[in-house]
Amino acid sequence: MLRFRDKYFDSHDLDGIARKYMNADLSASKKTEDLQKDLEASKAEIERLRVDLALAHSGRRMLEEELASQARTLTELREEMRRIAKDLKSLKET
């Protein structure tokens, strides 16, 4: 009784099969190289995004500090206006 493999090679062209086998890329090195290139490109993109995020965060912090400074200035100006208004009112009463 013949096994499956024996029957396959008995009924097919062994030279054709050998040529196909010899030409086949069984190493998968091409795919590995492509994946390696994709990985390097992804790493570069991640690093660029990290830099962008750090700059955005730094800019945001600077804006927050500037807004806080302007809010303090506005509060001081309001207090000064209240004092001036109070002084004017006092002068009018005298």
Image (cartoon, rainbow, N blue to C red):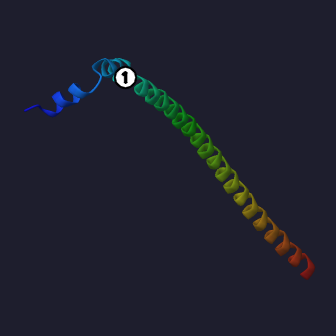
Q: Position of residue 1 (x, y in %)?
A: 7, 33
The one nearer the camera, 63 or 55, is 55
Q: Amino acid at mark 1?
A: Ala
What's the residue at 59%, 46% (across, down)? Answer: 57
Q: Position of residue 7 (x, y in %)?
A: 18, 30
In the displayed image of the protein, which residue is found farthest to the left?
1
Q: Is residue 10 left or right of residue 62?
A: left
Q: In the rendered image of this protein, does residue 58 appear above or below residue 7? A: below
Q: In the rendered image of this protein, does residue 93 appear above or below residue 71? A: below
What's the residue at 90%, 76% (across, down)? Answer: 91
What's the residue at 76%, 67% (across, down)? Answer: 79
Q: Is residue 41 left or right of residue 16?
A: right
State how many labels appear: 1
Q: Is residue 59 left or right of residue 39?
A: right
The one nearer the camera, 36 or 56, is 36
Residue 18, by quadrant, is top left
Q: Secondary structure at mark 1?
A: loop
Residue 67, by quadrant, is bottom right
The one nearer the camera, 48 or 65, is 48
Q: In the rendered image of this protein, does residue 93 appear above or below residue 52? A: below
In the displayed image of the protein, which residue is found farthest to the front?
11
Tell me, yes or no, if residue 94 can be seen here.
Answer: no
Q: In the rendered image of this protein, does residue 29 appear above or below residue 73? A: above
Which residue is under mark 1?
Answer: 24
